[in-house]
Image (cartoon, rainbow, N blue to C red):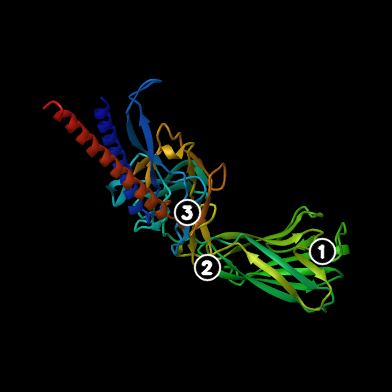
Amino acid sequence: MSLYGALTTAISGLNAQSAALGYISDNVANSQTTGFKRVDANFENYITQSTRTMSESGAVLARPDYRNNLQGTLQQSQNPLAMAIGGQGFFAVAAANGTANGQPTFDQRQFYTRSGNFVQDKDGYLVNGAGHYLQGWGTTTTGALNRTTIAPIQVSEQTFNPIATSTMTLQANLPADATTNPVSTQVQVYDTLGRQHTVTMDFTPGAANTWAMAVNVPDDVAATARGTVQVQFGKAATPTVTDGTVGALGTATGSLVPTATPGAGNPAEVTFTTDFGQGPQTVTLNLGTFGQSNGLTQFAGTTFNLSNLAQNGVPQGAYAGIAIQDNGDVMVNYDNGQSRMVARVPLVTFNEPDQLQRLDGQAFMATSLSGNPHIYDASSNGAGKLVVGSTEASNVDIANEFSKLIVAQRAYSANTKIVTTTDQMLQDTINMSR
């Protein structure tokens, strides 16, 4: 029995070392594969019989020892859509299984990967080098993030609709030492069609610490001034406020409507209505806060000093590209300077990622041993951080694999020597009967 046991044990050793050599071969072949996770050999001993007085040779088996949780080196990429994960987690991806009406259809199973070399395909989807489609949280019609489900991220190249101006903000200093000469400033606003128009604001000094502000919109279909309103500073207001700050908005004419509740801490606003041919458009002009110097002021000087004059309207914008932020937000950029979030890339973690089922294309599937997937924002709840503009290299160490290769080769050769020796001894035993 001992000779036969030695033979079967040596053969199991040959099989185990062959399996280990296969793992090494696969690792070396994928040493340059983005997001690849190596497989080591875990040798296990099987006992036939072992007591205090007798031990029979058993067998050895090489089981795969997965290294899905071991991060590879992060490498910078010239691809702005490439992403790597620094720490724990996987990208959620989908696999296409056909097309319908010119668009891909997707496998209902959920896949995961660390291969983040994503690019935008012809249909606007973000796809990695293995052909897997990046999934994320989408947005609602109001732009809010929808965390109830994840789906393949598709970016549309539609235009950015114009936004009509509804608010203007003025930060400036009216010269307290000025003469009776008025001062003027202009701002460009947009109507509902994205067309640009000019709004003019003229300030004429009156009684002490009082100015008359006139608003004019030359493009208004009525072609008339919007009206005037008195702006009272410091002691001219009732109740008085800090000198040089807006304290009250007095008598108004035309379509100008000042703040109904003046008082320290309240916003100093004037609302007017204009019509650019598409119907009434209401605009609110913010002059700061009553009693504070964060908007329109009247301090020493002889010239008008404009610090900021802004409005919230934008013209129509054409698609200019996409970008991914560090928090995973997928932003669409337009040539009018605007951006819009269309999705967010989450990360998926597992309690035991080394127990995931390996698939083609550096992808994985959840198993009963890996635990359920947990979907989180990047850099939260144990999920790693997103490194945009980088990819994760294979976690294979070539030098280490060559060392294992030498050991496996010598172990295989040693087992072949045992087989030939055992065979010779068995032959000698058979020859004894002759």
Q: Nearer the viewer, mark 3 or mark 2?
A: 3
- Identify which amino acid the numbered label 1 is placed on: Thr
Residue at mark 3: 84
- Identify which amino acid the numbered label 2 is placed on: Arg
Total count of labels = 3
Left or right of 392, for residue 247:
right
| Residue displayed at 50% across by 57% down | 388
Mark earlier in primary sequence (3, 2): 3
**Residue 215: image x %, image y %?**
68, 68
Mark earlier in primary sequence (1, 2): 2
- Callout 2: few (<14), some (14-19), or many (20+) C-alpha neighbours within 10 Å? some
- C-alpha gap between disc 1 and disc 2: 35 Å
- Direction left: furthest residue: 434
Residue at mark 1: 245
* Vertical side of 297 occupied by 354: above or below: above
Left or right of 19, for residue 282:
right
**Residue 242: image x %, image y %?**
86, 61
- Identify which amino acid the numbered label 3 is placed on: Ala
From where the camera sits, is residue 106 visible?
no
